Amino acid sequence: MNYFLTEEQQMLRDLTSQIAEEKIVPVRAELDEKEEFPHEIMKVLAQSDIFGIFIPEEYGGLGMGSFELCLAVEELSKACLGVSTTYAANALGTYPILLFGSEEQKRKYLPDIAAGKRLVAFALTEANAGSDAAGVQTTATKDGDHYILNGTKQWITNGGEADIYTVIAMTDRSKGPRGASAFIVEKGTPGFSFGKKEKKMGIRASVTSELIFDNCRIPRENLLGREGMGFIVAMKTLDQSRVGVGAQGLGVAQGAIDEAIKFAKQRVQFGKPIISFQAIQHMLADMATQVEASRALVYAVARHIDSGAKDFSKVSAMAKVFATDTAMRVTTDAVQVMGGSGYMREYPVEKMMRDAKILQIYEGTNQIQRNVIGQALIKEAAGRENDS
Amino acid sequence: MKIVVCIKQVPDTAEVRINPETNTLIRDGVPSIINPYDLHAIEAGLHLKESLGGSVTVLTMGPPQAEGALREAVSIGADEAVLLTDRAFAGSDTLATAYTLSSAVRTMGFDIILCGKQAIDGDTAQVGPEMAEFLDIPHVAYVGKFEDISREGLRVRRLMEDGYDIVETPIPVLLTVVRELNQPRLPSLKGKMRAKKAEIKKLSLADIGADGERVGLAGSPTQVKNIFAPEARKDRKTLAGTPEEQAARLIEELRGLKCI
């Protein structure tokens, strides 16, 4: 399919695909097995300017948008979702600064992020605040020119490895969701430490940790936006990043199809390569059709965001739901096509299947995404009724 | 520090197929790549520039389409690119190639010249050392490690069949490099964008002030009579036995040679 990429977009895709093939594929099984953070790959991404894609040129980036970020994420995800999660979580953590940061904050942080010198993480989730983001219990108490943070964040991607954290904490618990605020916290700040490192089913090259704030003092200028804007910061950030999770789904599903086809051409049963059997062909046909539909949706939504659209929660959620549900199905079917071989760790599809599961869960479960879509539908219908 | 890296565009031998009827290489449609050893030379150039300052210029001699290899080198990080191209250069053997390249670098100016140890399509490993002779500068071939880098000179490890030498050399110098030296970096996105627009400087026979009788086919005395792989070394040993026995004997042998 021709998606009408510009020459620069084509270059970006070629380069990320080359990085995936040459630097990620050869080590992905080992990173998964050892649950090892991909430091070397992050260096390569930094050197190749991949961290700067979505950061404006005046802050040292390439000034591209959501669509280009999706292209890069798709290519990395074909090779390894653990690596692409590490990369995408960096973008997730950066969006609060990009969207709500002051000029001073942008100048201070974005150039290093664009150069890949400092990795970022986004910290919203807590033990009692997952799908119900309003349950945040971490507090930020004002003390003169400082805020004092107390509480524990859970399941934070890049936790411990990142240098910069965008953290949601309550500045006024009496106000409920309107009492939350967003802050930048740097690694090394006294009172800020890391807890348990999680052992996961998949995306094991990425690191998921607890963040512990124990009377952690941060300067007032680290507040993002204004007090009370924390949930707006979080929601706008997630709207922006969700389509990228869709691109992850797209990538891992395509990677799984490629492996399944390669295998089905070689595997001989009943005297023929199994790809010659209609049972296999129909499975592959469904897989490929679903992935192409995901791609069309993810690309269209990313371009819609880049066109300057104001409200894209609904379509962003649609892209995430559709592409990641597809990824789970397609990776599972890839294992099925490959049979016993697919189940073995010698082949990459069992990892892809384990990895794909998280896409239906993180950055808003697919059930929450359907809530977002449903609420948007109700709002739109109400709007139409008022018009008539 | 002016660093010049000489590169060659070669057919991607991994993609070459053989015509089963004629037993000859099918070159049509085979993609061209930068000679793999030359990628290590480019990386070495960038590494030296990062340590010593200065600039990296890539140079190649070839037909106009060799520009593709130069643009790729720019996308990896080279500052400038020069294409030596002239119908008079066609048919050059290693002597004429080395003469032409050395005439060009003399007009361009240089402190350190880097080459891959050999090209994968010719495998002679002659051009680098011959260039150094024409330029009357020292050369070190098969460089596998930089031991020390300074503006006054370099200390390098030269990989030999039977071990390695540590060689100190003043600058200017020409080095040919092997794979063990480094891990070539990939292009960057900004580099790729810059490469698209980069000016490729073209130099002809007249521009480099070379003798027309010593370039191209006219300047190439080589007559290929026979192509053969060099004779195997006589002191080769074959270890027999089970894998475990072989491993034990190998350790014994290596200990004997003081390799481990």
Image (spheres, coloured by chain):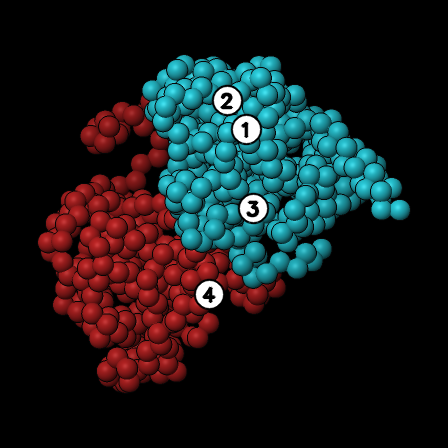
Name the amino acid, label 3: Leu
Q: Is the C-beta separation of discs 1 and 2 under 8 Å?
A: yes
Residue at 26% x, 50% y is B50
Residue at 81% x, 42% y is A383
Q: Which of marks 3 and 1 is nearer the N terminus?
A: 3
User: Compared with residue B123, is residue A261 higher up or lower down, i.e. above or below?
Assistant: above
Instruction: State which chain is coloured cyan.
Output: A
Q: Is the C-beta separation of discs 1 and 4 under 8 Å?
A: no
Given this view, does label 3 or label 4 mark the residue nearer the observer?
3
Q: Is the C-beta separation of discs 2 and 3 under 8 Å?
A: no
User: Compared with residue A124, is residue A57 higher up or lower down, i.e. above or below?
Assistant: below
Distance of mark 3 from mark 4, alpha carbons? 21 Å
Name the amino acid, label 1: Gly
Mark 3, other Cα within 10 Å: few <14 / some 14–19 / many ≥20: many
Q: Chain B is drawn in which colour?
A: red
Q: What element carries label 2?
A: loop
- Look at mark 3 in the image and give the residue it sits on: A69
Whether residue B201 is visible:
yes
- Look at mark 4 in the image and give the residue it sits on: B196
Which numbered circle lies on residue A332? none
- Look at mark 1 in the image and give the residue it sits on: A228
Mark 2, other Cα within 10 Å: few <14 / some 14–19 / many ≥20: many
Given this view, does label 1 or label 4 mark the residue nearer the observer?
1
Label 2 marks a residue whose chain is: A
